[in-house]
Image: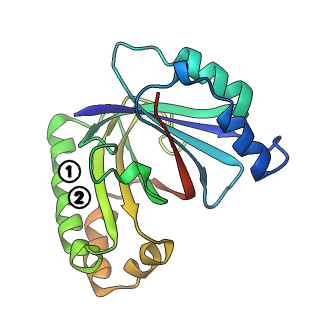
Amino acid sequence: MAIIQIMQFDSSSISSEVALEVKIQQISQHHLPEHVTISTKWQEPHIVQVVVERDAASSLDPLTQELDTLLGKLTNSFHVDVNPSPFTSPSPATVDYVEYVTTFFPVSKATPEFRESIVTDFMRFNEIVLTECKEYRIGISIGWSEELDAPEIQGEKAVAFFATTGWKTLAEMDRLMQTEAFAKAQPIVMGWGAPFKMVRIWGCSEQVSG
């Protein structure tokens, strides 16, 4: 079990990809935990996503403040208890193409029994799709977020089921969705009837070690 912090920054005020890379290189090494990735979203390249493996007792305030200054305004931040860590071999968080799927549930519904059933469903889904993508997928990590405010859930707090998947190529991500295995497995997770977000991180995922 590990804890990761997901942070997103709006870098639209930075003039170019080269300028953004310069900003990333300016981050102070002494603020960085051992495992960090800094990447951009495929759909929205001005959004920089930072994933940090952290200690429960440690404060990320110095790092967050510095990133907010260098990369742009912090727009989202939450932590997830994951198993295994996405930084543990085969390290899905550190490859060039990473897919993050966040599924939101009302906190009142997310009892321990409910969470266990969601994990069981997901493992069934995973077992089916793995028949099509075993050669192209680079690890998977799943977990549950802290309680958070989510516009997808009205009237109460939410919790999120979070899955991190590494891929060899972007094309293989898309190809999987056209297969019979995916068509067979998809009703398992769609049957949750829950809102979800998919974020694809691409390009040279910048791994920084302190």
Label 2 sits on a secondary structure element that is: helix
Provide the secondary structure element on which disc 1 rests: helix
Q: Is residue 106 above or below residue 135?
A: above
Q: Quadrant location of residue 127? A: bottom left
Q: Are marks 1 and 2 in contact (CB under 8 Å)?
A: yes
Residue at horizontal 29%, vertical 71%?
Answer: 187
Q: Relative to the observer, which residue lies in front, 76 or 202?
A: 202
Give the image location of residue 103, x and y in percent: 39, 50
Q: What whole-number distance in Å separates the C-alpha atoms at marks 1 and 2? A: 5 Å
Q: Is residue 156 visible?
A: no
From what the image shows, is residue 5 above or below residue 137? above
Quadrant location of the N terminus in the rendered image:
top left
Which label number is shown at residue 22?
Answer: none
Q: Residues within 10 Å of mark 2 (few under 14, many from 20)?
A: some
Residue 179 relative to residue 195: left or right: left
What residue is disc 2 on? 122
Q: Looking at the picture, which amino acid does disc 1 mark?
A: Val
121 vs 4, left or right, is: left
Residue nearest the viewer, comparing 19 with 93: 19
Residue pictured at 32% horizontal, 62% vertical: 138
Residue assigned mark 1:
119
The type of residue carrying mark 2 is Phe
- Kindly tell me whether residue 184 is visible in this rendering: yes
Residue sitting nearer the eye, 27 or 97: 27
Q: Position of residue 36 (x, y in %)?
A: 46, 36
| Residue at point 36%, 53% (across, down) | 92
What percent of the width, then of the height, locates residue 57?
Answer: 35, 13
Q: Position of residue 171 (x, y in %)?
A: 49, 78
